[in-house]
Amino acid sequence: MNQQDLLISGGHVVTLDPALGDIEAGDVLVRDGRIAAVGPTGTVLPADAEPHGVRRIDARGRLVIPGMVDAHRHVWQGALGAATPDTSLMGYVTRVVQDVAPGFDPDDIYAGTLWGALQALHAGVTTVADWAHNLRGPGHTDANVRGLRDSGIRGVFLHGGPGTDTAGFFGRPGGRHPDDAARVRDEHFADGDGRLRMGMALRGPAFTDEAATRADVAYARELGLPISVHVGMSGFPGTVAALDRLGLLGPDINHAHANQLTEHEWQLIADSGGSVAVSPTVELLMALGTHPANGPAAGYGIRTGLGVDTTTSAGTDLFSEMRLALAAERSRTAAPAIARDEAVGTVTPDPRDVLRLATAGGAEAWHMAEEIGTLTPGKQADLVLVDLRAPHLDAFGDPVAALVLGAGPSDVETVLVGGDVVKEAGRLVGAHAEAARELVTASRRRIRARVAAVAGAGS
């Protein structure tokens, strides 16, 4: 079905394309799901030349930015918001991965994934790398993919475990990645669907032995799929060095977290062409390291994106992640001067740097920069309108700074994915959006009952 042409008109357009820059009063023309043109208002499609059937969206008083890219999120946990606000990593593993996750049946995976993806869209996240690690069989896996697809989000479905043995898969050496991944690739991704693509969520050296790590990576590469692994978390030293020792590093690996890497390990990632995903809120609240890794990654020229990680311990948006990435990195770089009791003269990074992390950076980290991440003609029409007329965003200075320092999901007025309007006038649209709350409410009741029954049986 042909999409209606759209003219996003009169907004402050932040293209993040160095050749185009910002346009204070600009238009974006969307045709056939892609950005057809960007320019000052009235030059892209003059009013007297506007063809019949073009829908004009008034963007005056709004900031128009590329759709945000969440580079690392466990989307199925969308149903479990704020379930573990006071836990360390191992507390999260015990409570969520070992205790609660087995209570999900395929319908619950569908509801949680749909709800989690809609949470992302509501917050202006148009692409998500979904680290799906509650796949207990083909039914769970198919439901996860269907939840992503029905939401309308763009994404990378990262096929994880655990099969039927959670503790054995994540907590003990040995075993290999579920071989259902080949079926999933062939059944769900063989047609090259433009919205969703597939990758592999692997345990890596932190959560299994070297033989299993080698076999898992070989399986992913046999299938031609990109890889994500958790590395550099406190208590799991030497994970990148182990991958290097096994001869496994490469440009197809995205390294999640990377908080406690040595300089040698940073250089190994840089030399391999790998990428990094940083989740500041979870990393600091769960004490994965002393600081998020966006600064060190930038210093080594590594492709880096931002991610929420898990909504059991963080919010659902990248605005808060941008703020924390900005503040934490300024604190890290200023620490030597502060330790000497010296006044700090210059602080870095700046707000635009972290906006880039949340957009173009995530696209680069997942090899999608040719399609998304900037408002460049020819790319997919994934874009977000943020209402700058709210009192807390009415900037005297740079509106990008106002966005990074003050915006939240409720300020996101309009969201497009591939030219489709998925949020308008501040509300998600579509049949799945309307049904999702009822689905997730019923799912939570089922999950609580199952978890309580298991706990009661074991007492």
Image (cartoon, rainbow, N blue to C red):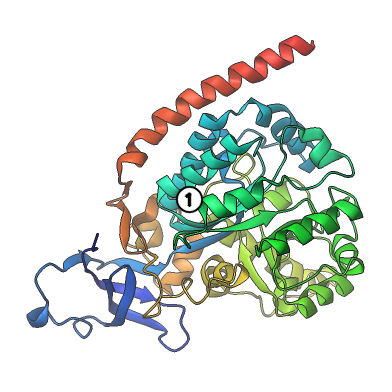
Q: Secondary structure at mark 1?
A: helix
State the residue position of label 1. 120
User: Is residue 79 visible from the viewing direction of this image?
Assistant: yes
Q: Nearer the viewer, residue 127 or 189?
A: 189
Give the residue at x 62% y 69%: 365
- The percent coordinates of residue 96 (x first, y second) are 69, 33
- The percent coordinates of residue 436 (x first, y second) are 40, 35
- The percent coordinates of residue 82 (x first, y second) are 60, 36
Give the residue at x 58% y 73%: 364
User: Is residue 308 visible from the viewing direction of this image?
Assistant: no
Give the residue at x 85% y 39%: 171
Q: Quadrant of the N terminus?
A: bottom left
Q: Is residue 337 above or below residue 160?
A: below
Task: Place residue 124 in its image quadrant.
Answer: bottom left
Task: Place residue 186 in its image quadrant.
Answer: bottom right
- 238 lies left or right of 308: right
Q: Is residue 150 above or below residue 57?
A: above
- 315 lies left or right of 179: left
